[in-house]
Amino acid sequence: MRIRLRRTTCQKLKDQTLNQVLSNDEVEKPVEREVRRSKPLPVYKGYDLVETNENWLTTKNILVVLAHPDDPEFFLGGSIARWIKAGHHVRYVLLTRGDKGSNDPRLTAEQIAKIRIDEQRAAAEFLGVISVDFLGYEDGYLIPDLEMRKAVVRFIRKYRPQILVSCDPENLFPSQQYVNHPDHRAAGQVVVDAVFPAAGNQFFFPELLEEGYEPHEVEELWLSLTGKPDVRLDVTAHWNDKLQALKLHASQIGDPRAFEKRMLERAHSHQGKDFYVEEGFRRIIFRRISG
Ligand SMILES: [Zn+2]
């Protein structure tokens, strides 16, 4: 299920209707196409010295560790779809259950958590993610302490990914319009702290050895939601998968039509394509002293 891009001319684009950008004849169940753009697509300016490819020669086990249900799809849903379509294996570990993800006074935190767990499992299943683990920390209160670091190390050692994915803990202000959620920064921090040196060193958290979790070194760390990307993946062909997965987080997106419109405004015009979507990452490829 992919969107097929119609090569519209700039003149047509000025008419600013969605159905001129997206051909809907291959879309499984797109929302109505009458929604109007509020402004023309921005022109992609390009970035120097940025990779645009994973350059992976083998099938990878990829572990995504983030704070909340919906973070994987919002931050990197297109890349997750791209990786799974390419045959890689993706798992999620989420630190919280998103239990503060509503202001509806009729709902308890437990009820919100249950809704969000169900939504996250549905979105993950839609994309083809192998498993989703919820560590159950309280939403909004994440502190990247030693106990949480051990919990993350346990899952790195359990699933033994070559590629570990989180978000950039240094990203305090993702844009001039909002401040990053402290849980996102905390999640990024605890993952960075867990991957080196604790995950690969037997002297960290020896009780994990007793549980049967041997040290494990990952090959690469990818940090989404970053202001300093050094790799940008073209996820245009996976945009519809990302959108459909996000819509499964129904409690979080509000009106689906307005949501789709907002999402579409992130698209660029790029290299002759009228519609282009990418996701950026800060990428660390660990240099091994041995082996
Ligand atoms: Zn979040």
Image (tube, rainbow, N blue to C red):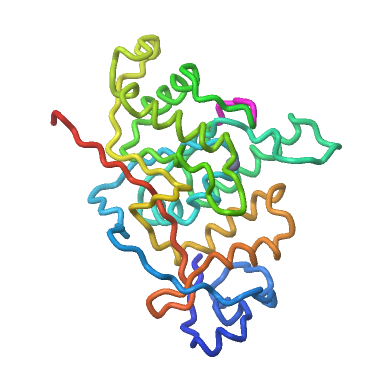
- The part of the image, by quadrant, that contains residue 18 is bottom right
Q: How many marks?
A: 0
Residue toward you, 167 or 126? 167
Tell me, yes or no, whether the highlighted magenta stretch contains residue 156. Answer: no
Give percent across and percent down for residue 76.
Answer: 48, 51
Give percent across and percent down for residue 149.
Answer: 45, 22
Q: Is residue 210 left or right of residue 180?
A: left
- The part of the image, by quadrant, that contains residue 193 is top left
Q: Is residue 53 above or below residue 289?
A: below
Q: Is residue 122 above or below residue 184?
A: below
Q: Where ligand 1 lies, by quadrant? A: top right
Considering the whole magenta stretch, tell me its main secondary structure.
strand
Q: Which residue is pictured at 35% across the width and 29% down the height? A: 195
Give percent across and percent down for residue 227.
Answer: 44, 50
Q: Which residue is pictured at 37% across the width and 43% down the height? A: 222
Q: Which residue is pictured at 37% across the width and 76% down the height? A: 271
Please give the range of residues in magenta. Answer: 134-139
